[in-house]
Amino acid sequence: MSSPLSELPLLSEPDQIPLHQPNPRDRLWRWGTIVGFFALYLCNCGSFGLWDPWEVHYGEVTRNMFETYDWVNPWWGYKIQIGTEPKGGNWFYSKPIWIFWSEAVFLKIIGLSDWAFRIPIALIGASAVAMTLLTVERIADLRRALVVACVMGLSPFVYMVSRQAQTDMPFVGTMTIAMCFAALALFSRREILSKGAFTRRIALFVGFVALNLIPQWSIVATDLIDANAGASLTGLAKIGAQIRQNGRYHLLVYIPVGLAVLLSVLIPVWRNRANWDAAFQDRTLRRCYWLCFYMMAAQATYAKGLLGFLLPGAILFVWFVVTNQWRAIAKVELVRGLPLFLVTVLPWYVAMFCRHGMAYYNRFFIHDHFNRMGSGVHQIDQGTFEHFIKWLGFGLFPWTVFVPLALVAWVKLRPNSQSPQSDALYPSAFLYRVFVLCWFWVAFALFTASSTKFHHYILPAVPALTVLVGMYLVDLKRQTGSARRLQLLLALGFGAALLINLLDDQQHLRNMFTYKYDRPMPSNLPLNWDDTLSWTSDSKPVLTWRDTEFAKHLGGMSAMLLEQPWLRYTTFIPIVGILAALGLVAAMWRRLQRFGFAAITLSALLLAFWALNYYMPMLSPSWSQRYLFESYYADCTPHPNPEPIEEAYTPLIERMGMTSAMEFFGTKHKRVCKEDIISWLITWRGETFYSNNEIRPINKEAAQFEPYLREFNKGETFYVLMERGRTSGFRTKLNRASTKLAGQKVKGFQEIKSWQVELINNESAFFVVARCKPERKPKVSAHLSR
């Protein structure tokens, strides 16, 4: 048997490539699994508030984009200066546009709702799992594809980050889909398609190209317009400025290039329509896969920046080096792919350079790329290669127990091995294993070398690792005797150690994707709706969980689950661990191995459902500011929106009269109160998002507090968001500042005797909201004054 290293399908004649002939009865397993993952990821994804600081940070940029109709120039923060402190708002250069556009689309459809921000992230996460399943099936078989999908889709890193409206899953999801397209072009088996089926594939490709190009071209054409561009210039300089500041001129470059690439694929298809033989179909489909790879690499670049194309490029390069498949470079469609990549990725980046110049370059490329890798940005954790090993352990639980075994098994695998059977039947599956191994090690090495190490930064390595584990599990099931038992015993030992670690700290799962790792676990958790909230500071008003805003706004399923004692962390995690352990033990006997692996999969599924619908909602009263602001809106005096704002916040489902859908999603228009709310010496982002950027940020007491009272408040009732335990001190400072302003005869303060500072929300472990109401001095009657 020849080595599979010489049998790369991309370089083979079609009649030498093994056929992919799926059994029609497999459709239920394939599509049922895919639908199941979409249901799991979407279920209740907007039923609890967005978390500080990343979800609300990016969410506010999207909300402002949605309100202002400017989808090109992201803005973050308050636009008015208070006191001598510079205004907090500015153009938002830190992240590219993918997350903002995807969220804005759902804001247009379902309106201002937490669902609109989380749905696109859940969709891209589930899509990455689905694409991986379809890819592995085309390269190996459905059994391996289903196992790989379960390992990937039921790994905490994947499903929990898919429930966070932050940039990591858009990056990893789009990159994973890109790598799947590359794998299909390189390794997939040949299909025999009817003319109708082949036509549908080509139509699907054309639709995919249109979906990647037309929306962003339209946005740049309509939103990059400056009527005053070049007003102070003359001649060619004026013409150049007008071209740069008008997106419609940019399309004069993008459209011809995009059409040329598309026609270079479609014209040969049309000319050979009478001779769509197997060879022509295979070459054309692999070409389409490569072009889809380039477009998805561009989308990954829109999601995270330079890593979107540099990381896939580095992985492919290392794979070429390791396998010595240099001849394949001639087949990767660079001549078509590179122009298509550029017209997909450049429109928004070019628009930002045209509008903002070097300020954008210095912040986005220098600070947020090179400084993060080199000197470190927001560095809150240290470590080398062992740092991410720990978090991969938690992030892949319970599949983690197989990771070291899968890596060792791969080292022992040989290209000409007759085992596993599917590799023997289709030898280039070995090359695919090399491909995903290169993917894992390149990503792991890159982020280990980075100076900035958030725990979730290792996520780009996770899809590759889950593919290796999934394929190993199928091989393991085919082994017999003591070798399999020894591996399962080792897995049992790894699992016991990991379970002890998980039980040691209830925040390990949360710390995989949040920012403030040293925040303590709240002492009050909504584990019983009749429990009383008891705090050591700012203890009044005393509430039960049933009386809280959290209880009023939490989704019904999660509210029901939180009442179940057996779902509490210290009970449920051991249940999951014991179930997985029993599965490992059962798998040691061949007659029971099917039930054993089913038990392990069930434990992973239970953990996923619990984490998404119980664990994350349980932490939300303290990790989301939504419920603080629900109290504010319930207590304040509503202020009507101007007509343009009302129009901006009217979603498609409201225009269609779908009131039940609005109730389900909790859709609301922008809410503004007549009474101000200020943030007192905090910048956690949620206060800006949930106030619709109406909050008055007081970040420097000396420079801003008195100017705020004098110029904005003028002695009227207002609200304050502050850290727990600061209420008494704030009351003292407010009364002192008020007395000082009264002494200066500032209008509105001379009649104030003192201020009542009363908490209206007391359910977060970290923040409170208080109403600040002035007590006026009694008016002296006219005859007494005489």
Image (spheres, rainbow, N blue to C red):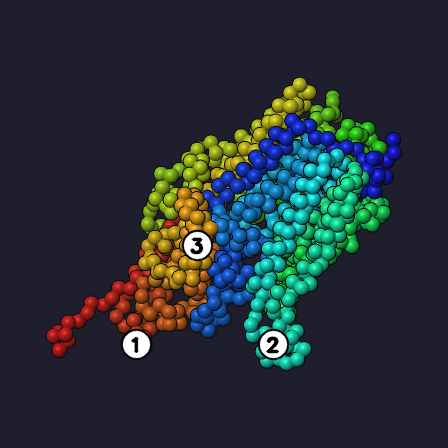
Residue, far left? 783
Numbered disc 3: secondary structure: loop
Local packing at callout 2 (Cα closer than 10 Å; few below 14, some 14-19, many 20+) is: some
Residue 435 location, quadrant:
top right
Checking the image for residue 286, the label placed there is: none
Q: Is residue 781 above or below residue 543?
A: below
Amino acid type at circle 2 is: Gly
Q: Earlier in the sequence, mark 3 or mark 1?
A: 3
Q: Which residue is mark 2?
A: 230
Q: At x 37% / y 55%, what residue is drawn?
A: 632
Q: Which residue is mark 1?
A: 745
Total tally of numbered discs in the picture: 3
Can the viewer see residue 724 in this picture? no
User: Picture coordinates of residue 392 (x, y %)?
Assistant: 64, 42
Front residue of this view, candidates 119 and 257: 257
Q: Which residue is mark 3?
A: 650
Which quarter of the rendered picture does the N terminus lie within?
A: top right
Numbered disc 2: secondary structure: loop
Q: Is residue 713 above or below residue 288?
A: below
Residue, far front? 274
Mark 2–mark 1 distance (CA, rounded to whole Å): 50 Å
Mark 3–mark 1 distance (CA, rounded to whole Å): 45 Å
Q: At x 54% / y 33%, what residue is drawn?
A: 606
Q: Is residue 240 above or below residue 328?
A: below
